[in-house]
Amino acid sequence: MKRSIFFSVLLTCTFSYGKDVEQCEGIAYAADTLMTFHQMGSDVDKAKGIYANIFKEEGQIFNQIVDEVKKSTVYTNEEEAEKAVEDFKNKWKNYCIENNIK
């Protein structure tokens, strides 16, 4: 229950942030946040349903990020986990820029 509430707050903040600044920064922020939760052992798959409930739509890019996060390795070493988060965030930001995601 606590994680569901936390995910709801997180998603609202993440995509409000995405609307207020450059779109690719919002996507990078979502990727960073979801990978961080994944590294902490959270079930990020629940985020899809929460996103759809909050925004009354299914976010294609958001779902792609969640799907990729779920396939990622969870590291026990803090430095490796932080590097995985940073690399994932940069990958999605670059993807957004290269594909002119709007």
Image: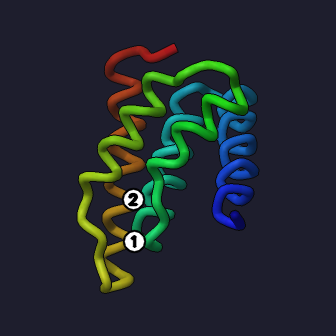
Residue at position x 54%, y 55% in the image: 33
The residue type indicated by label 2 comes to: Glu
- The reply, left or right, for residue 20 in relation to residue 67 is right
Left or right: 59 in relation to 20: left
- Give coordinates of residue 51: x percent, y percent: 62, 35
The residue nearer to you, when weighing 79 against 56, is 56
Please identify the residue farthest to the front as the structure is shown: 1
User: Which residue occupies 39% across, 59% down?
Assistant: 86
Q: Which mark is residue 82?
A: 1
Q: x, y percentage for residue 62?
A: 48, 33
Q: What SS does tag 1 mark? A: helix
> Within the image, what quadrant is residue 82 found in?
bottom left
Q: Residue tagged by mark 2? A: 86
Q: State the image coordinates of residue 80 (x, y, percent, origin top left).
A: 29, 76
Disc 2 to disc 1: CB gap under 8 Å: yes
Front residue of 62/42: it is: 42
Which amino acid, mark 1? Answer: Glu
Looking at the image, residue 96 lies above or below residue 101: below
Mark 1 nearby-residue class (10 Å; few <14, some 14–19, many ≥20): some
* Residue 2 pos. (x, y %): 71, 67
Image label count: 2
Image quadrant in which the N terminus is located: bottom right
Snapshot quadrant of residue 13: top right
Residue at x 52% of width, y 48% of height: 46
Above or below, 87 against 16 in this view is below
- Assign a secondary structure to mark 2: helix
